[in-house]
Image (tube, rainbow, N blue to C red):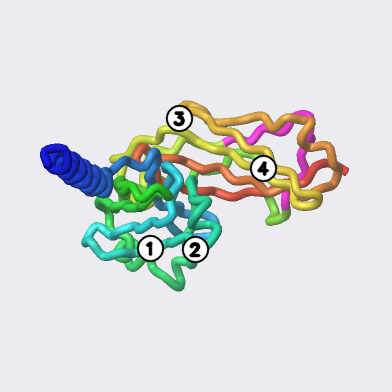
Amino acid sequence: MLNRSLMFLVLAMSAWLTSTLAVEGQGERIPFSKARILIEFNASARDVGVQVLVDGERWKRLDIFHPNGSRILEITGRSSLRKQGLSELFFESSEPSLRDVPLTEFLARFPQGTYGFEGVTVAGIELEGTAALSHVIPAGPEIVSPVSENGDPPFEDPDRLVIEWKRVTQTIDGSQNLEIVGYQVIVEQEDPLRIFSIDLPASATSVRVPPGFLVQPDTLHKFEVLAIERGGNQTITEGEFLTFP
């Protein structure tokens, strides 16, 4: 009788401990390794959008929340993808022209503040994170060279090509309350597609494009110079040139 009672007590304790651990496991939360949201403004095309980057342990569900608490994105893996899980995710919103969506309307859609990120891993553990969105948007870098004198792309010597710009010192609305933390330069040859990209410090105002990249004569190349503000927002100025025949 004593042995049966002891066995019953052991089984009851084991069941209680298992259920307790299960409940505690369900309440566990781990942070996303990355959670970012930023504004990208194109000073040449005069359009604007948001970009989001999120990364974390293999997840099967992701939700992003507006600063007012409303859900603005919901992603759920299904079938094989739910079992496999997702990790890093980067996406851009559409980038409407300011003629179609004025900047004030866009900023009202995406107010500055804290955006919440929530998810669930493949193992059922909750993920969480936050990202701050700023409305400090840098002005576009003013390109010094290469620039067109007649509206047509200028011809450039591939052995001596330097892209140069003026340092950005204000926002798109003229405020000097900003901090540029870096620049990015991207050069693209469309046919065949080749891309040169480099990240530069805030002190940089020029970069020499490697001659080995510009090997195709009489070819149109498009380029962008991006100014990046400490809050993450970035602004593009576009340009183009032709290599000598």
Q: Quadrant of residue 107?
A: bottom left
In terms of sequence position, does the residue under pointer 4 or pointer 1 come before the other? 1
Name which of mark 3 and mark 2 comes first in the sequence. 2
Q: Which mark's residue is nearer the viewer, 4 or 1?
A: 1
Question: From the viewer's perspective, is 61 left or right of 66?
Answer: right
| In magenta stretch: residue 160 | yes
Circle 3 Cα neighbour tier, 10 Å, few/some/many (<14 / 14–19 / ≥20) = some
Q: Amino acid at mark 4?
A: Val
The three-letter amino acid code for the residue at tag 3 is: Ala
Q: Which mark is residue 73?
A: 1
Q: Residues within 10 Å of mark 4 (few under 14, many from 20)?
A: many
Residue marked by disc 3: 202
Is 89 covered by the magenta stretch?
Answer: no
Residue under label 2, please give it: 78
| Mark-to-mark CA distance, 1 and 3 | 33 Å
Q: Residue at x 77, y 44 (%)?
A: 155
Which numbered mark, 4 or 2, is in the foreground of this view?
2
